[in-house]
Amino acid sequence: MITAENIRYRTIDIDHLQIAPGITSVIGPNGSGKTTLLKLLAGIAVPDAGTILVDGIQPRNAEIGWVNEFPDRNILFGSVFEEIASPLRFRHLPCSEIEQRVELSMKSMGITYLAARPVQELSGGEKVLVALAAALISRPQVLVLDEYDSHLDANRAAEIVRIIRKSGIPTVIHCTQDCEAAASTDSTIFLETGKILHSGKPEDVFALLAGTAYYPLLW
Amino acid sequence: MKLSLAGVKVVRGDWSLSAEGVFEDGIHLVSGDTGSGKSTLALMLAGQLPPASGAIEREGIESALITFQFPEFHITGPDLEGECRTWDLDPTPVLKDTNLAGKKTLHPLDLSRGELKRLILACVIAKNHDLLVLDEPFSSLDSREKERFCATVSGRKTGITIIFTHERVHFPRVSRIWEIQEGVLHDRGRLPVALSQWNRAPAVIKKLIARGRTPENFSQADLLEAACRT
C-alpha cells in the first residue's frame, strides 16, 4: 500500500492519496503533473512538504522499478544484454545467475533477438521493452512506468500488461494517454493542474469523464 | 505532387525492409508493429537516410520535413521563444495556440513531454512543407491534443502528409493506408476499402467492421457515426 499525505511539490497539491496493490493508471492532460507525481511516488523527487510511504517506508528506501517516458534516459549501457543485466550486476549477483535471469527475462519479453544489438540502434519501442525488462528483473515491490505504452503497438502493449500481471510485482503505477488501456487497470487517478480530480475504479472515474475526449471509445 | 518508391530496400543484419509504392497528395497512414521499421522508412521518405538499394523519387515536391518520434531531438533553442525563432516563426501566435505562452521563458526540456511534442508539432505544421513526414506524432499527446492535432493536419490543403503511428483511437481522415508486415510495406489502398484489408487495424475499427458497421474513414466523427448508425 502506498499512502501520500499533504503533498506539495512544484504543481503537485495532493491532500490524500492511497494506492492499493494492483495496477493503477494515472491519466490527465499534458502538463497536469503526472510525471511529477510518478517521480515523487518512485522517490526520484522528494516533496517540499508532506509524506509518502510505501508499505510504511520512504520510497527511497523501498525497492522501486522505474521506466522514464524519454526512452533514451533509461539507458546506461551499450548492449541490450548488459542493460538488462545491470540491476543484478549492481547487486554483485553471481555471473551465472545473472546470465540465466537475463535470458529468461528477454525470452518472456520476446526480445531475445535483440540481445547483441547496441541499444542506440533500437527503435523507440524496442528501447522501452529493454527498459521494462531492466526494471522488472530485480523484482521490485513497486513498478512505476511513465507512458511506456506510447511507444508500443497495441499487441505488444497488451502482451506487456500480461507479463507485468504475471510478474507478481505487488503494485504497478503507470501513466498513460491510452484511456482504453487505463480502463482495464484496477484503479485510475485523473490528475489536472497538479490536483487529483477523480480516483477510484476505472468505471467510476470514466463515468465522471463521459462526454470528454478521455472517455474510452470502445465503451 | 508525388513520392515514388521503386525497389527500395534497407538491410541490417538479418532484419530488412522492402518498399514499393507511390504517395500522392493527401494524408497517408503507415502502421506497423514495434521494431518493424517505421522510423527507418520515415527517414528514407524524408530524404534523411539513403536506401541500401532502389530509388526514391520526388515529383513537384519543393520542400520536405520530418518530425521525429522523440520531440527532444528537435530542440535547438534556449527557451520556448528561442525555439520558435529557430524555426523562423513568430513565437507569440505559436505559444498562444499551444497554450504555452505562460511558459515562454522555460527551457524546452522543462516542459512535460506532451507539451514539448505540442510545441514542436505546432512549429512543424506552421512551416507548411510540401512533404510532411510525421513519426509517431500522437505519442505523449493527451486525448484532447490528439484531436486538436488531427484537426490541424486535416486543415492542410495541399501536399503529402505521411503519418507513421500505432495510435489506436485518434486519427484524422486519411486518404490511404499502408502497413509494414514481415519486412514489407503493403499498400492497403484507399478508404473505406482499405479498412477491411488492414490486418492490424485498431480494435475499435475491427469491432465496428465485425458488427457490419464499416466506417467511411476513421476520424472520431467517422467512428462515432458508424457506432451510432441505425
Image: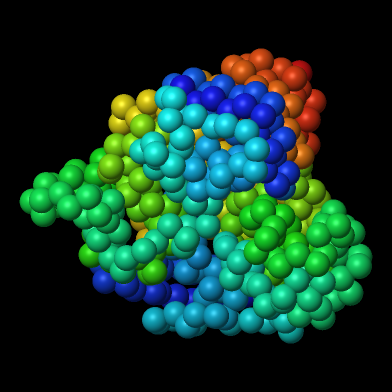
In the image, taking residue A154 as reference, residue A104 lies left or right, namely left
**B122 vs B86: above or below:** above
Q: Locate residue A205, reporting x and y percent.
A: 67, 20
The x and y percentages for residue B102 are 86, 57
Whether residue B81 is visible, yes or no, is: yes
Report the number of numbered marks.
0
Q: Is residue B60 left or right of residue A178?
A: right
Of residue B159 and residue A6, the one placed in the foreground of this image is A6
- The answer to which quarter of the image holds residue A5 is top right
Farthest-out residue, front: A49
Q: Position of residue B154 (x, y in %)?
A: 79, 55
Q: Is residue A113 above or below residue A27?
A: below
Q: Quadrant of the C terminus of chain B?
A: top right
The quadrant of the image that shows the N terminus of chain B is bottom right
Residue drawn at (69%, 26%) of the image: A15
Q: Residue at x 91, y 67 (%)?
A: B92
Where does residue B98 sit, x and y in percent of width and height? 82, 56
The answer to whether residue B168 is seen in the rendering is no
Residue at point 43%, 52% (across, down): A128
When asked about the image quadrant of residue A156, the answer is top left
* Image height of A169 relative to A101, above or below: above
Considering depth in this image, is A19 or A70 the residue closer to the camera? A19
Q: Is residue A205 left or right of residue B97?
A: left
Q: Nearer the viewer, residue A114 or A32?
A: A32
Figure quadrant of residue A214: top right
Q: Look at 57% across and 32% down and name the residue there.
A: A51
Figure coloring: rainbow
Q: Is residue A125 left or right of residue B109?
A: left
